[in-house]
Image (tube, rainbow, N blue to C red):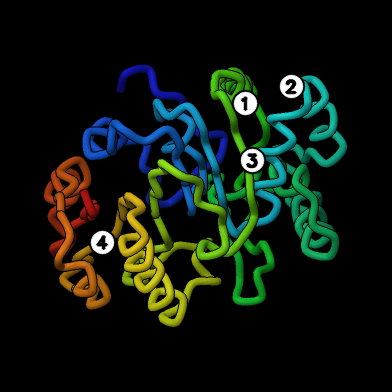
C-alpha cells in the first residue's frame, strides 16, 4: 500500500484500499486538491498535492481535524481524557452521547467515534449521533494514527479545512476537485443528510465545474446490488473508469448481487 497512513476515523466506503488505483487516475498537472467530501481523509492525506482544501459537512469532524492541525498531540489526548469512557462503561457512553447531541464538541465527537460499535459514526434524521456502544476506547493504535496524521499535515505547503455545503467551497485556479459523496443507492449511517435533491444539485454542480474548465473526478456506484444509479447518466460524455479494487472484492462475495464502483473525470 506504499505505506499509506490510515485514518483515525472508520468510514463506510473508505477509499484507503483503492488509493493506488484511484491516484493512477488523478491529474498530474494540478497544484491543489479540493476534497469536497473528505470524510476520514484517506484521499487528501495520502495524496501528492502541494496544497489541500479538505471539506465535509460534518462540523465536528472538521473541527477535530483543525485541532489536530493546530494543537500538540499531548494537548489533544489530555482533552480527550476529559470525556473518555472505559470499555465496560455503557452508561458512561450513553451519557456522553446525550451530552454531545445537546452540546456538540469535536473532542466529544472523537471519543464517541473511538468508543462506538465498529468505530463507525452514525446519525439519525435529525443529525443526532446515535451509534451504539462498542466496548471500545482510545488505545495505542488510535494514538499512533493521530501521530501519523499530524506528521503528514506538516508536509503540505498549505492545508485548509472547511465545513460548507459542497457547492459553496472556494475552488482556486489550477485545482483538481475530487468528489466522493454519500452514495445514494447504498446505505451508510452518516448519510442521513443526503437526498435525491442534493444528488441532483451535485450533478449540476459537476457540469458547471466542467463548463468553467475545472478538472474533476467523481467516485460513485454505477450499480449496487443490481440497482443502477440513474443520475450518472448526466455524466455519460465524460471518461469512466471501473475501480477494479472494489469490483474484484465484490465478486468474491458470492452473496452480493452485481455492484460496480466507478471513477468519472473530465480529462
Decide if residue 79 is on the left or right side of residue 24. Answer: right
Query: Mark 3 against mark 2, which lies toward the viewer?
Result: 2
What residue do we see at 65% from left, 69% from top? 127
Query: How far from the left and from the top, in percent, is residue 144?
Result: 59, 20
What residue do we see at 14% from left, 44% from top? 248
What is the distance, in whole Å, between disc 3 and disc 1 at their CAs? 12 Å
Which labelled disc corresponds to residue 114?
A: 3
Q: Mark 2 points at which residue?
A: 73
Badge 2, how many Cα within 10 Å: few under 14, some, many 20+?
Answer: some
Which labelled disc corresponds to residue 221?
A: 4
Query: How far from the left and from the top, in percent, is residue 244?
Result: 15, 43
In terms of sequence position, does the residue under pointer 2 or pointer 4 come before the other? 2
What is the distance, in whole Å, between disc 4 and disc 1 at their CAs? 30 Å
Camera-nearest residue between 9 and 241: 241
- What kind of element bears circle 2? helix
In terms of sequence position, does the residue under pointer 3 or pointer 1 come before the other? 3
What is the distance, in whole Å, between disc 2 and disc 4 at their CAs? 37 Å
Q: Against 7, is 109 above or below? A: below
What is the distance, in whole Å, between disc 3 and disc 2 at their CAs? 16 Å
Badge 1, how many Cα within 10 Å: few under 14, some, many 20+?
Answer: many
Q: Against 240, is 244 above or below? A: above
In terms of sequence position, does the residue under pointer 4 or pointer 3 come before the other? 3
Q: Are marks 1 and 2 in contact (CB under 8 Å)?
A: yes
Query: Mark 4 against mark 3, which lies toward the viewer?
Result: 4
Decide if residue 115 is on the left or right side of residue 46. Answer: right
Q: Mark 1 points at which residue?
A: 146
Q: Against 240, is 184 above or below? A: below
Amino acid at each position: 500500500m506504499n505505506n499509506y497512513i490510515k485514518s483515525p476515523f472508520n468510514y463506510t466506503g473508505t477509499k484507503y484500499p483503492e488509493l493506488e488505483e484511484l491516484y493512477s487516475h488523478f491529474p498530474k498537472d494540478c497544484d491543489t486538491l479540493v476534497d469536497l467530501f473528505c470524510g476520514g481523509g484517506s484521499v487528501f492525506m495520502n495524496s501528492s498535492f502541494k496544497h489541500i482544501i479538505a471539506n465535509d459537512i460534518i462540523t465536528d469532524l472538521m473541527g477535530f481535524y483543525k485541532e489536530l492541525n493546530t494543537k500538540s498531540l499531548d494537548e489533544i489526548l489530555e482533552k480527550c481524557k476529559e470525556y473518555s469512557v472505559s470499555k465496560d462503561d455503557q452508561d458512561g457512553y450513553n451519557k456522553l452521547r446525550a451530552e454531545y447531541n445537546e452540546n456538540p464538541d469535536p473532542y466529544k465527537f472523537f471519543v464517541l467515534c473511538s468508543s462506538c460499535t465498529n468505530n463507525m459514526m452514525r446519525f439519525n434524521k435529525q443529525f443526532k449521533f446515535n451509534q451504539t456502544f462498542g466496548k471500545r476506547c482510545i488505545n495505542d493504535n488510535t494514538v499512533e494514527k493521530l501521530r501519523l496524521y499530524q506528521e503528514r499535515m506538516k508536509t503540505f505547503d498549505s492545508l485548509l479545512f472547511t465545513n460548507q455545503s459542497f457547492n459553496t467551497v472556494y475552488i482556486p485556479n489550477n485545482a483538481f476537485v475530487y468528489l466522493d459523496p454519500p452514495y445514494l443507492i447504498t446505505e451508510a449511517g452518516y448519510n442521513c443528510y443526503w437526498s435525491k435533491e442534493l444528488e441532483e444539485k451535485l450533478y449540476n454542480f459537476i457540469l458547471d465545474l466542467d463548463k468553467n474548465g475545472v478538472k474533476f473526478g467523481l467516485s460513485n456506484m454505477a450499480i449496487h446490488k443490481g440497482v443502477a444509479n440513474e443520475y450518472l447518466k448526466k455524466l455519460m460524455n465524460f471518461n469512466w473508469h471501473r475501480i477494479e479494487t472494489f469490483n474484484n472484492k465484490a465478486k468474491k462475495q458470492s452473496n452480493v448481487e452485481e455492484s460496480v464502483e466507478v471513477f468519472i473525470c473530465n480529462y
